[in-house]
Image: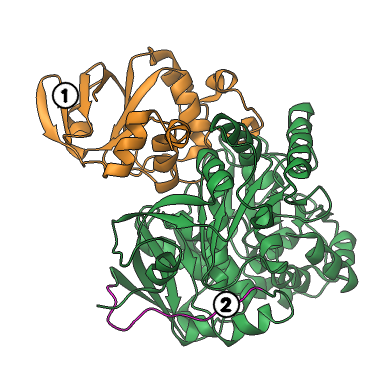
Chain colours: A green, B orange
Amino acid sequence: MGYTLTEKILLEHAEVDHLAPGDVVTVRCDVVMTNDISGPMAFHTMTKMGVPRVFDPAKVVVVSDHFTPAKDVRSANLQKRLKEWSDEQGVTFYGQGRGGIEHAVLVEDGWVVPGSVIAGGDSHTCTHGALGAFGTGLGSTDIAACLAYGEFWQVVPGTVQVELTGRLAEYVSGKDVILAVIGELGVGGGTNMVLEFVGEGAEALTIDERLAVANMAVEAGSENGIFPADATTAAYLDGRTDRPWKAERTDDDALVDRRLAIDLDALPPLVAKPWSPGNVAPLDDVLGLHVDQVYIGNCSNGTMTDLRQAAALLRGRTVHPDTRAIIVPASRKIYAEALAEGLLEVFVEAGAIVSTPTCGACFGGSTGILAEGEVAVATTNRNFRGRMGAGDSAIYLANAYVAAAAAVAGELVHPADVLGRVPA
Amino acid sequence: MRFEGRAVLVPGDNVDTDVLYPGPYLNIGDPEEMKPFLFEGLDPTIRDRLGGDTVLVVGANFGIGSSREHVPRAMQAWGVRCLVGPSFARIFYRNCINLGLLAVQSAEAAALAREGSWIRVDPAEGDIDVDGSTVPATKLPPFLLEAVRLGGLVEWARAR
């Protein structure tokens, strides 16, 4: 019997001759990533393990992104510790204003290649599956072991293969693809599994769309969301990395635990209603709902693709007087590109807040907290109760077109309806 | 190796780490200081029932979402001895094992347990005793069992 793509990657990174789902193996890391939340706790734990130096400074990346810029003294102390530790260990450090949101930074700076293993102290490390890597989220103690020894224990996951056919319709994005999958699987349906995206519909997705899809694999409980590397991946990596890589695929006779099929032609814009990413409904079901805050950004949907989609709605229009919009490019490079392209001007002219790259309000950290009873539409990945603020606030997850349309209309509307209106 | 204690029931399936330990308090590093925020978004009164000999009995797919280790660290600081539930989210489960906090899968035990039930878990044997009734639980693989036996990944690393 053959192997799945994920089994092949793990086999390459473990000292075993064969493996199967359920086996516990020790996996070697190609990159270990941590941030201002998981990092300081991991550094302390590594010291307790009795290990003074990281296993290989060239494979460790530290990114300041969660409480960035620091909202209080406690957070500032975490940032300070992050920099001091990184300097001391000689690892790559993206300080405040230098990088952006960790997953965006790792991808755009060529740290991630197909077939590699990325161990990240953040649950959305599954984003890196977009480039055909095994990226997986770990807690601080795991990260401490990764920093110390360059490896972590892993139960070999099974595979849910998602076949995408057709093409995305207008105003439908990668966000809707993954919401459809989570709606189908539920928030636990992918546990002990990876999601693997195949088919001509998957191959037609750009890297930005793949990142949006892979990013939310963890919301189905999955360890990673992987796209087999193809010509699109190769084109993206060209000039971005000098790391060697080769494209692999799941063998025809490999054991796939479950298969799902999504017809992109028939996929409408979706939302995830409060308070679960699995509470998925068509946008049409929630039209007319008043929106207090629109948040466009985060590690899933703060790419140039998302900013262009938002700008298409906001160009020449203004944010509704009863609504505020916060736009957060995912990285410094995306920020600079959006600036050069005139998108940031579009947002500012529309009356939106343009933020520095940060995880910020996505996890309720800072810069965009919701008041009691408020409703937000966000391109982020989680709408758990109280995630962005007050316990009775509500978050609707949606794509950037839908979010920007809500900013203009002050309520959930179809983007086509906003574009059909004559700009004021 | 045996873990035992008094059951505290945490109702609901798919309980996420945001309600278990909200984001604004993730800048705290000392587990003692994390204690006042455990269960903050779910039901803060659960904290009043933690007695230092607690076995948390939880719903299915417990601990979904973030990789924040604050959740199991705060649980340990409150004296939680182990968790019993039908299933756990993957990163939360890893974090527990890595900290030496046993999390055992048993839908039967979770269904049987009442608030205050006396629960005994033997992770090597793969069964759970709830008020004198023995029901099956998923056995831990040897590596995980060893990590828990040693008290977590720090002790595992020191023994390496």
Residue A60 sits above or below residue B77 on the image: below
Percent x, y of residue A416: 66, 75
> Disc 2: which chain?
A
Taking the magenta stretch, the answer to whether it contains residue A245 is: yes
Helix, strand or loop status at disc 2 = loop
Task: Please give the range of residues in magenta.
Answer: A243-255
Taking the magenta stretch, the answer to whether it contains residue B85 is: no
**How far is disc 1 from disc 2 in space, using C-alphas?**
52 Å
Mark 1 or 2, which is nearer the eye? 2
Q: Which residue is mark 2?
A: A245
Task: Return the mark for residue B144.
Answer: none
At horizontal 45% and vertical 38% (from top left) the residue drawn is B95
Residue type, numbered disc 2: Trp
Instruction: Specify whether A112 is left or right of B3.
Output: right
Res. A317 in view: yes
Residue A167 sits above or below residue A39 on the image: below
Of the 4 image quadrants, the one containing the C terminus of chain A is: bottom right
Q: Which residue is mark 1?
A: B130
Between A366 and A79, the one lying in front of the other is A79
Within-10-Å neighbours for mark 2: few <14, some 14–19, many 20+: some
Percent x, y of residue B34: 57, 23
Residue type, numbered disc 1: Val
At horizontal 48% and vertical 54% (from top left) the residue drawn is A277
Within-10-Å neighbours for mark 1: few <14, some 14–19, many 20+: many
Percent x, y of residue B56: 33, 26
